[in-house]
Amino acid sequence: MGYRDLILAGMLTGALMSPLHATAPDDKGVVHERSDLWEETWQSADEVWRRTVEALRPGPAAGGFARLWDDIMPRLDETLVLSDRHASLPNRAWFGEDRASNQLAINDLLDEAAAILAASPSQGYRERIRELKLAMREARTEIAEYRRRRVSAPRNAVWQKTVADYDAAIAEREARIGEYRDELQVLHRSYVADLEALGLDISEEQLEFLLSTVVGDDLIGMGTAFHNVKAITVQLERLTEESGEDLTAARRYYGMYTILLRVLERMHGRLIQDVDERYLPEIQAIVRRTRDLLAETRGLQRREAGRREILAANLDAQRFTLRAAGDYQDYLLEQRGQVASARRQLARDIAVARNTYETVKVAGDLVGLMQAGQRLLENLRSLEVPALRTFENLEMKREFEQLTLRLEGRPSG
């Protein structure tokens, strides 16, 4: 299912806020430019917001949205104020704010908003899944160690572990692994159900693949963010309609919609940057190290005739690592390409929304803006969810998980 269905229904067709001049400190003592009219519309808009939020509070789902609304709105407000004053700031200033410092403040707010939009109750699933997989790896490591010790263990002894003791310990660890596996299946089903509620059509097998990759969290986070943007823009559209003749309030709401698009675009950009600057270079380093090891192993094969069987097994493992690293790199490039395509579409939408915003600040034509917004809604192309895969086999799945641990800088066990 495309992202389009997640965001188009909530697309605003209202107008944007224009900055009016006068000064008034906010509750933090910061002075912003406002006029008496702006102050009045600000207060009236806040009253509508409070009524909307209160109407949404009954019930668990509504309570979740109310918290999202309360968390995101101050960031959108502040980002809009900083964005509106950006052009009036000097490029550089020895004292006070300039465009560079203002942009840094905007970026921080966009990142805060992105974290809020990407958050969901289902995040706990991923952490628990990681804990269970780590516990399974530890149990398998212990089993291997117990089997090694069992070889030289006595059948009967008082002060040291016997064969029977190690058999019992191995059976206990194997039982634990079975319990962990059962819990993982339950978690996967619940996680899939939650993601489907966000409009992400994904199977349990595809989820397993996604969670095994270093970009899995980011892709799920972007899907969650699109879902939350839809919910927020539906309410902004409602507030725009309720504002009636209050053009300033309507502009404010549409301005916030523009900021939401910028948040989504920044999330896409951050994933692309991580792939380019972190993950692909590390994959390439793994490939180089494995090729060097492959050459060393072949040299040992020529010199160590009596150990050819061991070295042949090493060669097979090294070749498999190269294959997995190549597949992983291809997958990251595939995701990067699709995310970059979606980002370009978002950039076009932002340019149109921003242009409309600036135009209405001059013209004040609310009706024309609504018509233009409707045309934009009709012309948007679908933003597709990056392609999902399943594993060819269990061995490849484990290799992907090991590579992901290395890319994340965590011990692979």
Image (cartoon, rainbow, N blue to C red):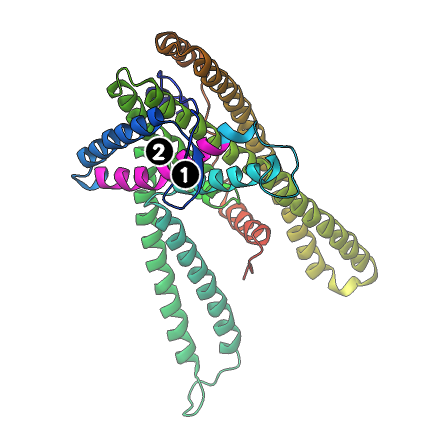
The crowd level at tag 2 (other Cα within 10 Å; few <14, some 14-19, many 20+) is: many
- Tell me which label, 2 or 1, sits earlier in the chain: 1
The residue drawn where x is 45% and y is 88% is 160
Find the distance from the CA under tag 2 to the CA under tag 1. 15 Å
Q: Which range is magenta?
A: 62-82
Is residue 311 part of the magenta span, yes or no? no
Q: Can residue 6 be seen in this view?
A: no
Is residue 80 part of the magenta span, yes or no? yes
Q: In which quarter of the image is the C terminus?
A: bottom right
**Quadrant of res 337:** top right
For disc 2, the marked residue is: 228
Amino acid type shown at disc 1: Arg
Q: Which residue lies furthest to the bottom in this view?
A: 158
Which is the main secondary structure of the residues drawn in magenta? Answer: helix
Amino acid type shown at disc 2: Asn
Left or right of 180? Residue 149 is right
Residue 238: percent from left, percent from top: 26, 22
The residue drawn where x is 40% and y is 34% is 77
- Above or below, 168 relative to 267: below
Q: Which of 98 and 144 is in front in this view?
A: 98
For disc 1, the marked residue is: 75
- Above or below, 19 relative to 127: above
Q: Which of 356 and 47 is in front in this view?
A: 47
Say if mark 2 contacts mark 1, CB within 8 Å: no
Residue 283's disc number: none
Instruction: Please state the total of marks drawn on the protein image.
Output: 2
The kind of secondary structure element at disc 1 is: helix
The kind of secondary structure element at disc 2 is: helix
Q: In which quarter of the image is the N terminus?
A: top left
